[in-house]
Image (cartoon, coloured by chain):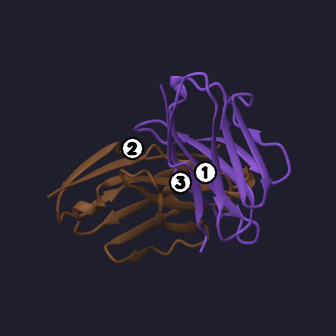
Amino acid sequence: AQKVTQAQTEISVVEKEDVTLDCVYETRDTTYYLFWYKQPPSGELVFLIRRNSFDEQNEISGRYSWNFQKSTSSFNFTITASQVVDSAVYFCALSGPNTGNQFYFGTGTSLTVIP
Amino acid sequence: GAVVSQHPSWVICKSGTSVKIECRSLDFQATTMFWYRQFPKQSLMLMATSNEGSKATYEQGVEKDKFLINHASLTLSTLTVTSAHPEDSSFYICSARPHRGGTYEQYFGPGTRLTVT
């Protein structure tokens, strides 16, 4: 079964602090894809990153970085030097060819950056 | 590229009426479109998967007679909430998978906020 767990429901940090959002997934597929999306108050999902199961390289994009570890089935997301504009709900998602490529979303982590 | 639009962005309707929500892929053709529902402070839950020219596949617990999905073309899918009730009030999001491209690709629309009074 496909499952994504985001144990952190809500996180508050003070501006300029670093923050890591955790994502743990379960799948029996050998090929799968992991995603992170940002959902600001407007509701529109903003795509942040996609990772396939064969690429465990960590990635950095500006203040964002992602740590993918298959050994622990985790795909954590770190925001460095957080800003107020980072306040949003962040979703981790999983998809795979054996389940019709539908997305399985975690329950989301609501991040509040306090100025 | 890869833009998905939804119309309307928000709608208020009276209990008992029907509401149609459109999902369009603007710059690509979509073989498959997905419809999600999101209640406040909750995650996205897949309602149904629609393939162009065929009947939609509904997730368990989703009433297909209440949520009518039509995917008549490669760029348009519609969700009709029939005889809406206040409990149908939610944020509805569609996504589209390109006809050509990786099977993992899926692009999300901006969502439609439905309020049933």
Colour used to depict chain B in the structure image: purple
Colour used to depict chain A in the structure image: brown
Q: Residues within 10 Å of mark 1 (few under 14, many from 20)?
A: many
In the image, residue B75 sits, relative to residue B64, either above or below, namely below
Is disc 1 placed on a helix, strand or loop? strand
Which circle, 1 or 3, is nearer the viewer? Answer: 1
Chain for disc number 2: A
Label 3 is placed on what type of residue?
A: Ala
Q: Are marks 1 and 3 in contact (CB under 8 Å)?
A: no
Q: Mark 3 — residue? A: A93
Q: CA distance from mark 1 to mark 3?
A: 15 Å
Disc tally is 3
- Work out whether mark 2 precedes mark 3 in sequence or the reverse, and give the earlier one: 2
Which circle, 2 or 3, is nearer the viewer? Answer: 3
Label 1 is placed on what type of residue?
A: Cys
Q: Mark 2 — residue? A: A7
